[in-house]
Image (tube, rainbow, N blue to C red):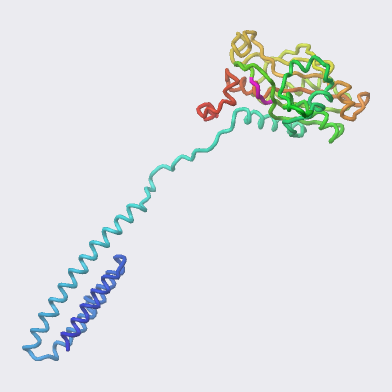
């Protein structure tokens, strides 16, 4: 009977509504049951086959079922609509918003200076080499013409490994003989790295600091070659000519030896705590490689000559960036590092 078909249609429709998960499915089910060509319409077409008195009764039941289903579809639409709005709010992206800032790490100014210097020296044909920070007494002192009894060791008071012939290297010069033994001559190389000394810390002294040793060995190398390379170095770092001076200096591994000073760029030569009120800052020791060091490296000093220098990367960074306290570099203060 038609009334039975209507009741079954109602049950199927309610069951379908209960399994719907989004608005698109709801619309499809609504069309299936209540659309112009839907299941309810197909059943109502059979009303013409019924007697007049029964037709009115079945029509009333069909109308009631349609109203009930319509209410159920509307109720389901409200529930699903609210659910999808919430989902859209969760997934919504403002395409006009500015891109969130990515917080990246910062290079320490010493690293910046080191990379700049490496570029400068590699452009002049120098290799960039590395070596151990825990060094043997032989390479750190003996091979640099500083035997165990030499008073120069006192000025490089360092950290020793108890019971071992090892020290925390006091200078990157310790790589000179290593490089000569490995590469021979002619040779051009720089050795950047960390050094250690038992220092009383202040604005211009630190127990951990960074150096860059430079070594050039060839035939007929003179002081003129040394001065030319130093000027090219400073011009490349500061992007302008820097006033310098050479003072005689004693270092066991060079002969003759010099102290290269630059006019203090913090105070402009007027005097400050960094330059100890002198207007000049000692930047690097340098000189012609001592014949004994060449011999330790397996080279004949009668055939080969060269120059060496030890550049203080930490102090150079202070000059370039106007930093008035050396302790800031290793202090771990992010406010300092974030400036670079």
Q: Residue 319 vs residue 16: left or right?
A: right
State which quarter of the image contains the C terminus.
top right
Where is residue 230? Give x, y as percent. 74, 22
Horizontal side, residue 319 vs residue 288: left or right: left
Give the vertical position of 42 relative to 231 (above or below): below
The residue depicted at 17 percent of the width and 89 percent of the height is 1
Q: Is residue 109 magenta?
A: no
The image quadrant of residue 131 is top right
Q: Residue at x 11, y 82 (%)?
A: 59
Image position, residue 206 (x, y; %): 64, 20
Q: Quadrant of residue 70?
A: bottom left
Q: Looking at the picture, how far across and down is residue 142, in whole percent?
A: 83, 24
Residue 128 visible, this orientation: no
Helix, strand or loop: magenta stretch:
strand
Closer-to-camera residue (9/280): 9
Q: Residue at x 84, y 20 (%)?
A: 147
| Residue 177 seen by the camera | yes
Above or below residue 47? Residue 92 is above
Using residue 327 as the reference point, say whether residue 49 is left or right of it: left
Is 194 placed above or below 33 here? Answer: above
Viewer-proximal residue among 81 and 175: 175
**Above/below status of 330 relative to 24:** above
The magenta-colored residue range is 206-210
Direction front: furthest residue: 163
Q: Quadrant of residue 337?
A: top right
The one nearer the camera, 36 or 318, is: 318
Which residue: 81% across, 28% down?
A: 139
In the rendered image, residue 207 lying in the magenta stretch gets the answer yes
């Amino acid at each position: 009977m038609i009334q039975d078909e209507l009741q079954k249609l109602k049950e199927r429709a309610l069951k379908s509504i209960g399994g719907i998960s989004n608005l698109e499915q709801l619309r499809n089910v609504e069309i299936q049951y209540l659309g112009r060509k839907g299941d309810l319409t197909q059943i109502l077409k059979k009303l013409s086959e019924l007697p007049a008195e029964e037709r009115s009764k079945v029509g009333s039941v069909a109308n009631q079922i349609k109203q009930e289903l319509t209410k159920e579809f509307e109720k389901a639409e409200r529930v699903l609509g609210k659910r999808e709005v919430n989902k859209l709010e969760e997934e919504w992206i403002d395409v006009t918003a500015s891109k969130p800032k990515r917080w990246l790490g910062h290079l320490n100014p010493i690293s910046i200076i080191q990379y700049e210097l490496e570029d400068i020296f590699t452009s002049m044909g120098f290799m960039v080499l590395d070596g151990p920070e825990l060094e043997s007494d032989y390479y750190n002192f003996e091979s640099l013409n500083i035997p165990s009894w030499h008073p120069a060791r006192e000025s490089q008071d360092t950290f020793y490994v108890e019971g071992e012939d090892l020290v925390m290297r006091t200078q990157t010069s310790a790589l000179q003989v290593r490089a000569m033994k490995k590469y021979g001559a002619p040779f051009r190389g720089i050795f950047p790295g960390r050094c250690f000394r038992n220092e009383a810390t202040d604005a211009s002294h630190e127990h951990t600091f960074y150096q860059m040793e430079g070594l050039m060995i060839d035939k007929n190398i003179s002081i003129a070659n040394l001065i030319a390379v130093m000027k090219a170095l400073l011009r490349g770092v500061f992007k302008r000519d820097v006033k310098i001076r050479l003072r005689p200096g004693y270092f066991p591994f060079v002969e003759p030896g010099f102290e290269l000073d630059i006019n203090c760029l913090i105070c402009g030569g007027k005097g400050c705590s960094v330059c100890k009120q002198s207007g000049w800052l000692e930047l690097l020791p340098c000189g012609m490689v001592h014949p004994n060091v060449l011999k330790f490296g397996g080279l004949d000093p009668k055939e080969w000559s060269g120059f060496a220098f030890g550049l203080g990367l930490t102090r150079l960074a202070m000059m370039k960036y106007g930093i008035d306290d050396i302790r800031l570099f290793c202090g771990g203060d992010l406010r300092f590092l974030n400036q670079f």
